[in-house]
Image: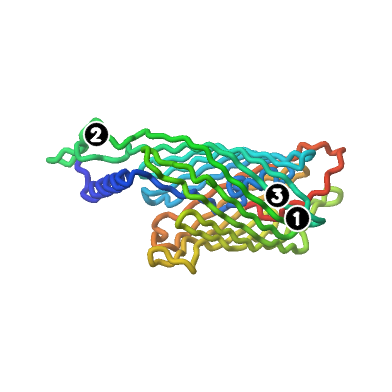
Amino acid sequence: MHLPKIELMHRFVLLVIACMLLAVGSVTAQDPQYSQFYAAPLYLNPAFAGSTGQNRVGINYRNQWPAIDANFNTISAFYDTYLEDKNSGIGVLLTRDREGIFGLQSMSLAFQYSYDLKIIDGLSFRPGAQIAIYNRSINFSRLVFGDQIDPTTGNLIPGASAENLNTGESKFFPDLAFGGLLYSKRAWLGFAGHHLTEPNQSLIGEESRLPRKLSAHAGLKFYFKPGEMGSGFYTRPQERSVAPAIQYRHQGEFDQMDVGFYFTFEPLIIGTWYRGVPFKKVNGFTNNESVVLLVGFTKKGAKDILNIGYSYDYTISQLGPASGGAHEFSLVYSWSTRNPRKPPKDKLMIPCPDF
């Protein structure tokens, strides 16, 4: 069976890109991003470790640009808990990011610590730190080279190519991050710095530093008259609120911003925001990336909370909606194990959204 000319051209382009990457001696990358950034709190900022005052476990999955070969798949899982007697939070975060064309993969395992510091009544600050180990690897097995194609028929010849593009290369390196979170009953302001030492991430022995990522996030929550669930002794309030929020990130030569609103009508949460930096152009183009839509469900029990979210990024950049945008899912469950007979400490709860 003959390969279509378009398919042959497609494979040729992939080969050219691969050779260009190797020619510069390194493969660079930026950190993956989550649209539901508050549903991935430990990924956003190590200061969020233990921030619920309970045990918490969660998983996040993102599939970006699924309609094209240059797609990205990111998955992370985390666990954190609050040590009430120590005013401290600890957490662990496992993340894997994979790029579609060349099998470029990054995995990390991070450990986090935060401390809850009461400044005055109604205002607290949480500093946090993270130490992580990263592994980066690459696999060019999807590429097809000239010695694998029959020149007379265009058919693929069984067997591997004689070309060697360092398939299977892998590199481990340590990494450090710090963050902080200032919050009251209705507002929050956070900042984080990742890859503070800018470790060398090159897979082929050259110099390729992972750019430092600096980020800030803030928001304000407006509460309305709560609803009610149940009746009699079992009646409990249901949250009704709106929360404008913003996040800004800078890494290397790249900047990105998310700005939007979360509407909570418990058990339903709806969010919408814009991603881009319209006042900063990239290669002559306005940086408009996507419009994000979120729908979430929250179920609160006497001692536990379950959050389930789905969001879709509608691409408005030059890449266009034909890329498939991005699909993202989150599942977070938190529960209390504290002794109910022990009176709780006077501790503020961070008002930021769960998604």
Cα gap from disc 1 to disc 3, whole angstroms? 27 Å
**Callout 1 amino acid:** Gln
- Which badge, 1 or 3, is on the more N-terminal residue? 3
Q: In this rendering, is residue 108 above or below 231?
A: above
- Which badge, 3 or 2, is on the more N-terminal residue? 3
The residue tagged 2 is 161
In the image shown, does 338 or 105 lie closer to the viewer? 105
Cα gap from disc 3 to disc 2, whole angstroms? 54 Å
Q: Kindly identify the residue that appears in the image at 66 percent across and 46 percent down.
A: 128
Cα gap from disc 1 to disc 2, whole angstroms? 62 Å
Q: Kindly identify the residue that appears in the image at 86 percent across and 48 percent down.
A: 233
Kindly report which numbered mark, 1 or 2, lies closer to the viewer in this rendering: 2
Crowd class of label 1 (few under 14; some 14 to 19; many from 20; radius 10 Å): some
Q: Residue furthest top?
A: 159
Label placed on residue 126: 3
Crowd class of label 3 (few under 14; some 14 to 19; many from 20; radius 10 Å): many
In the image shown, does 225 or 120 lie closer to the viewer? 120
Q: Kindly identify the residue that appears in the image at 40 percent across and 66 percent down.
A: 285
The residue tagged 1 is 238
Q: In this rendering, is residue 146 above or below 126?
A: above
- Which badge, 1 or 2, is on the more N-terminal residue? 2
